[in-house]
Image (cartoon, rainbow, N blue to C red):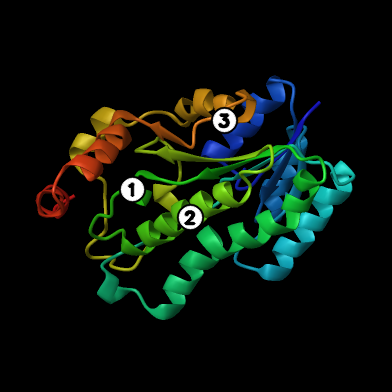
């Protein structure tokens, strides 16, 4: 039985993935920030550790618990936890930006480096990241969140190259609009000018289960893809970013 550690399992992609992978035969170790959510996950039959990616001590403690639970053997890490700070850049202070990066990027780096030796010792494993469509294109009002995902994309590319002489694969899942609680938990810096998805996005919004085929492929295929783009919007955005002039992309995106 292969073991996977998933971060951010209180709801959404993390919870859906944990349930599906457990049914698929994986040993799933989950994480969440709140004790109430931990209790719920344990009641559902999951092993669960508390993890606050914004707290270095919490990250270290969680990694130690995972290594203890697995006796130093871990097949996969799914870095899924994260949140968004939304608002125009001139409304976001340094503390808010640091918090955005602390959770979405610095914590991911710390956790991965603490767990990576377990994969290196067996020369196999999978490291999968939840990125976003805004890790491909940046839109007004989502600058802080987008910057953290751009950073995660670049970091993942480098980690993949640095592990190229091993059998540890690094993959990015890039969701577009999904029906999760993510938007409800966004930290909006402008209460009078809340950042929302454009109405047309509803036509392309998918349930969180849409990521599962891509996650299974990333975990189980001998040659997984580097990037898995989920929803038509993400695929179109990636093509536009690659083919269209920057100024044309600006015109398309400035009111999104």
Q: Quadrant of residue 150?
A: bottom left
* Residue 181: % across, % down: 46, 44
* Label 2 Cα neighbours within 10 Å, binned few <14 / some 14-19 / many ≥20: many
Q: Is residue 186 visible?
A: no
Label 3, secondary structure: give it: helix
Earlier residue among tags 3 and 2: 2
Quadrant where the N terminus lies? top right
Residue at 37% of width from left, 78% of height from top? Answer: 93
Residue 182, above or below 201: below
Residue at 33% of width from left, 48% of height from top? Answer: 136
Earlier residue among tags 2 and 1: 1
Q: Is residue 158 visible?
A: yes
Q: Quadrant of residue 62?
A: bottom right
Residue 29, above or below 140: above
Front-lying residue, 106 or 32? 106
Residue receiving disc 1: 136
**Distance between mark 1 and mark 3 Cα atoms:** 19 Å
* Residue 131: % across, % down: 45, 46
Residue 177, above or below 184: above
Label 1, secondary structure: give it: loop
Front-lying residue, 106 or 243? 243
Residue receiving disc 2: 152
Earlier residue among tags 1 and 3: 1
Q: Going by the picture, which residue comes out furthest to the front? A: 165
Front-lying residue, 172 or 86? 172
Front-lying residue, 44 or 163? 163
Residue receiving disc 3: 218
**Distance between mark 3 and mark 2 Cα atoms:** 17 Å
Residue 176, above or below 26: below
- Mark drawn on residue 8: none
**Distance between mark 2 and mark 1 Cα atoms:** 11 Å
């Amino acid at each position: 039985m292969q073991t996977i550690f998933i971060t951010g399992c209180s709801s959404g992609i993390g919870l859906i993935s944990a349930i599906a992978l457990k049914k698929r035969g994986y040993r799933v170790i989950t994480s969440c920030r709140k004790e109430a959510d931990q209790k719920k996950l344990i009641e559902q039959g999951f092993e669960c550790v508390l993890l606050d990616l914004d707290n270095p001590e919490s990250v270290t403690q969680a990694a130690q618990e995972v290594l203890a639970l697995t006796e130093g053997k871990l097949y996969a890490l799914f870095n899924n936890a994260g949140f968004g700070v939304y608002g125009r850049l001139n409304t976001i202070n340094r503390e808010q930006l640091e918090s955005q990066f602390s959770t979405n990027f610095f914590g991911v780096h710390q956790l991965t480096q603490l767990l990576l030796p377990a994969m290196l010792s067996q020369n196999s494993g999978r490291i999968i990241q939840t990125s976003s469509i805004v890790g491909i294109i940046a839109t007004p009002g989502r600058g802080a969140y987008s910057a953290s995902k751009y950073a995660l994309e670049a970091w993942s590319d480098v980690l993949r190259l640095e592990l190229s002489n091993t059998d540890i694969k690094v993959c990015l899942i890039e969701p577009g609009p999904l029906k999760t609680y993510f938007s409800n938990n966004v930290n909006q810096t402008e209460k009078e000018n809340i950042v929302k998805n454009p109405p047309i996005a509803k036509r392309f919004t998918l349930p969180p289960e849409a990521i599962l085929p891509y996650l299974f492929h990333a975990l189980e295929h001998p040659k997984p893809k580097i990037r898995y783009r989920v929803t038509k919007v993400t695929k179109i955005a990636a093509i536009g970013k690659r083919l269209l002039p920057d100024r044309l992309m600006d015109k398309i995106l400035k009111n999104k």
